[in-house]
Amino acid sequence: MQQTRRQYTLDDYLSLQRGIEVKLEYFNGEIYLMAGGSAGHHRISRNVLKLFDAALAGSSCEAFGSDMRVSTPSGLYTYPDASIVCGPRVSDASETISNPLVIVEVLSDSTRNYDRGEKFELYRSIPALRHYLLIEQTFSHVEHRRLQTGGSWIDEIKESPDQIVHLPEAGIDLQVARIYEGVEMASPRR
């Protein structure tokens, strides 16, 4: 006999998430436990968030870390490692944002393919999204996917410590070396 999986409503998910400390992802009626990160993962996330905060001081944009949930029109509810929202200030009572300009994911062996593939496809449904950064955590490699004026996405790879990731709509230039400060690096994969 085939076992059926329970389908959850969005309200089920939101109620469950409010009652626990671990982060859960929701999509298409299913709830998934999100993996924790290594020390390197946390250092990279912290570095990016500190760089975002410094660059955005005094602007109408605000950076959020992995405690802020992002929803997509395609129905994904998840917690990226960092995001930026521009425009009206996000309410202190908000638990979810739906209009990030920038989303950052720090990759791991267990999430790399999902973050680069299906998750990006779901994120692309966010009308405000212009930049998606995928950051390797054990070697210097930042993949910057950015939306062009015509609606297509292009990829830029930054691996050299002196290279810059430009996020012009937010007024941010991220130097690769600053993203990886304090992180033990291995040799790049080829």
Image (cartoon, rainbow, N blue to C red):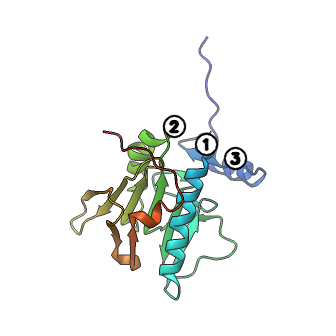
On the picture, is 129 further left or further right than 31? left
Residue, disc 1: 35
Gap in angstroms between the C-alphas marked 1 and 2: 8 Å
Count residues near mark 2 (Cα–Cα under 10 Å), then give few for <14, some for 14-19, many for 20+: few
Identify the mark nearer the N-term, 1 or 2.
1
Q: Secondary structure at mark 2?
A: loop
Residue, disc 3: 12
Identify the mark nearer the N-term, 1 or 3.
3
User: Relative to residue 87, is residue 9 depicted above or below?
Assistant: above
Q: Secondary structure at mark 1?
A: loop
Q: Quadrant of the C terminus?
A: top left
Residue, disc 2: 110
**Residue 111's x, y, as percent?**
49, 41
The residue shown at (61%, 28%) is 5
Q: Residue flagged by tag 1: what amino acid is it?
A: Ala
Instruction: Examine the rendering and report whether any part of residue 78 can be seen.
Output: no
Q: Quadrant of the N terminus?
A: top right
Asked if the residue at tag 2 contacts the one at tag 1, i.e. Cβ–Cβ closer than 8 Å, the answer is: yes
Image depth: mark 3 or mark 2 in front = 2
